[in-house]
Structure formats: structure tokens, C-alpha cells
């Protein structure tokens, strides 16, 4: 899969919409992303890393892109083998943190705390759609650093954010602060989503937007595992109990076995079990991602 380097016209489009976080290049065994003036190279083969480093310098010169630092990370076959990115070009004395901007919203980026720096670029259009929907109450499952919730809060929503990682939810609060959004009307729950959803249903809570963007695999502190191919259906059925009429629900995953068609088939089964009806909507293709790259996503509009 070779998508080449993005051109100067697309760079100007991103600049015009106040966005400085996007993918620069995609090839078969690697890709390049930028977060402000910092660049992250992801690679599966060392030769790919070297090629991307060389091409990056040439591309940056040709379009006038100023490189502050370059980080690189190996993409392993197993999640357990993931390591934080390593600095390959730039001042090692500088902090590993920076700020990326997406459509005027600011998000904290940290290249030193884990494999992922804090913002998934392939969810850009889904975050835009959340702002378009302007929900009153949004449930963000597997919230990570709460980028969906920041998007919703920026247009007046109250949010409930659930993640098993206290560290990530703390970063989520920091993202609210970066955008001068008070967290008094927002909840942050450190727990397993599968435990929280039935609890919310018993309380009679309802939401008009629900985000389901789980990891392919995770392990809760008690040792309980989540495997998306086995657990996604039960998760969706539980989430449907919390959805208002005329609400919207996002299904999204990076699992290669669950592309958009498979997600829709699964969703239709779960809707039947939950005795709900919905129409389906797919987000537009991202201009900086080749078809088939990034997360698979479908939106359900529930009736």
C-alpha cells in the first residue's frame, strides 16, 4: 500500500482549518504522521524506517515544512511488544510533550508515556461529526485521552468518560483544560466499560451520542481480558440500552477482521436482539489516509 506524500495544496487546506495533526505518508510497511512540528514514523521493517526518514527530509524541503523533531516506533505483531517512540532527530534535552491542534481544538501529545502519543488521527472526521451533532449528553466508552469528549464539550455537551486507565483519563482532563473547558459538568470513571454499562442502565441513564471505539485487545487490572471479536456484540447490546430515541452511536475499530461491512452485519444482529431500529452512516474518506487504512467506522442513527 503506497499512498505517497501529501501535497502542498492539502497542507494549505489543513492550515486553513487550523489543523496541524495529520498523516504525511503511507506505504506498505510504515507510515508518517505529524503533530504540530513533531513527526512520528511508524515502521514494521528497518529498511522502511530508513527510507521514510530520507524521503521525509526531501518532502519537507519541497513543501517548506519545518521539522522540529522526528520520533520513530516499531510496529510489532503483538500489543504486548509495543514500546514508546524513540527520538531520532532533534534536541534530546527538550520535553517529550507538545500540543497538536485539530480544527481549533488543542490536544496534549506525549511521546514518552506509551506506544500511542495521545491522539488517533484516523478519528478526525468522527470527531468533526460529534461537533456537528452537538449532543446534550454523550457517553464516551474506552475514552483514552477524551478527544471525542473535548469535541462534544466544545459545542455544549456534558460527557461521561469511561476507561480502565486513570493515567489516560487524567490526560483527558488536561485536554479539557487546554481548551478552557471546565470539567464540573463532566464525569470520569476509571473502570471496565463492561461493568459500567449495566450500572448506568439500572440507574436509567440515557445518552444521545455514544462512542464505542474499543481496543482490539485489553486486560483489566483484575486480569479480565477484552477481545473485540468475541466481546463487541455484547458490548453493543449493553450500549443500546442507554441510547435515547433519535440518538447516534459510533462503532469503530482497528481490528483488521472487522471492516465496515462486518461491523454493519454485527450491528444489525444486535439491533434485532435489543429490539431497536437504526439507519447507517459511514464517515467520509480522510484525504490523508488511503482507502482501507486506519479505523473502520460506522454511525448508527437510532429510532
Image (cartoon, rainbow, N blue to C red):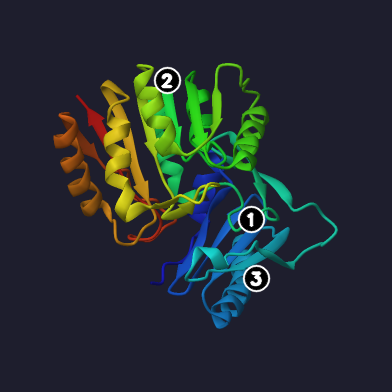
Q: Is residue 214 above or below residue 105?
A: below
Could you tell me how far apart the alpha carbons at marks 2 and 3 are, in whole angstroms?
A: 45 Å
Q: Looking at the image, can residue 206 be seen?
A: no
Pointer 2: residues within 10 angstroms few (<14), some, or many (20+)? many
Residue receiving disc 3: 57
Q: Is residue 206 above or below residue 193?
A: above
Q: Nearer the viewer, residue 161 or 279?
A: 161
Between disc 1 and disc 3, whose residue precedes?
A: 3
Q: Nearer the viewer, residue 61 or 116?
A: 116
Res 115 quadrant in image: bottom right
On-image quarter of the C terminus = top left
Residue drawn at x 16%, y 35% as measured from the top left? 273
Q: Nearer the viewer, residue 105 or 148?
A: 148
Residue 259, image x and y in percent? Answer: 28, 56
Could you tell me how far apart the alpha carbons at marks 1 and 3 are, in whole angstroms?
A: 26 Å
Residue receiving disc 1: 114
Q: Secondary structure at mark 3?
A: helix
On-image quarter of the N terminus = bottom left
Residue 81, image x and y in percent? Answer: 56, 68
Is 173 left or right of 121, judged from the image as shown?
right
Amino acid at each position: 500500500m503506497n499512498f505517497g506524500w501529501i501535497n502542498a495544496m492539502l497542507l494549505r487546506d489543513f492550515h486553513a482549518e487550523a489543523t496541524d495533526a495529520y498523516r504525511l505518508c503511507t506505504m506498505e510497511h510504515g507510515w508518517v504522521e505529524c503533530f504540530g512540528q513533531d513527526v512520528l514514523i511508524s515502521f514494521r521493517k528497518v529498511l522502511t524506517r530508513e527510507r521514510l526518514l530520507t524521503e521525509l527530509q526531501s518532502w519537507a524541503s519541497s513543501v517548506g515544512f519545518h521539522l522540529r523533531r522526528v520520533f520513530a516506533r516499531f510496529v510489532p505483531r503483538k500489543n504486548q511488544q509495543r514500546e514508546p517512540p524513540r527520538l531520532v532527530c532533534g534536541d534530546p534535552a527538550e520535553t517529550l510533550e507538545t500540543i497538536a491542534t485539530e480544527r481549533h481544538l488543542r490536544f496534549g501529545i506525549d511521546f514518552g508515556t506509551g506506544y500511542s502519543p495521545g491522539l488517533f488521527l484516523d478519528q478526525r472526521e468522527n470527531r468533526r461529526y460529534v461537533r456537528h451533532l452537538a449532543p446534550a449528553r454523550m457517553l464516551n466508552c474506552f475514552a483514552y485521552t477524551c478527544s471525542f469528549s473535548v469535541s462534544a464539550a466544545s459545542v455544549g455537551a456534558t460527557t461521561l468518560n469511561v476507561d480502565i486507565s486513570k493515567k489516560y483519563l487524567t490526560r483527558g482532563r488536561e485536554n479539557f483544560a487546554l481548551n478552557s473547558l471546565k470539567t464540573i459538568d463532566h464525569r470520569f470513571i476509571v473502570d471496565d466499560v463492561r461493568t459500567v454499562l449495566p450500572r448506568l442502565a439500572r440507574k436509567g441513564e440515557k445518552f444521545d451520542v455514544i462512542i464505542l471505539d474499543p481496543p482490539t485487545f485489553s486486560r483489566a487490572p483484575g486480569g479480565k481480558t477484552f477481545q473485540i471479536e468475541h466481546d463487541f456484540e455484547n458490548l453493543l447490546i449493553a450500549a443500546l440500552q442507554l441510547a435515547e430515541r433519535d440518538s447516534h452511536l459510533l462503532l469503530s475499530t482497528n481490528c483488521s477482521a472487522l471492516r465496515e461491512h462486518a461491523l454493519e452485519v454485527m450491528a444489525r444482529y444486535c439491533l434485532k436482539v435489543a429490539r431497536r431500529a437504526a439507519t447507517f452512516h459511514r464517515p467520509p474518506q480522510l484525504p490523508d489516509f488511503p482507502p482501507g487504512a486506519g479505523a473502520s467506522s460506522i454511525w448508527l442513527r437510532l429510532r
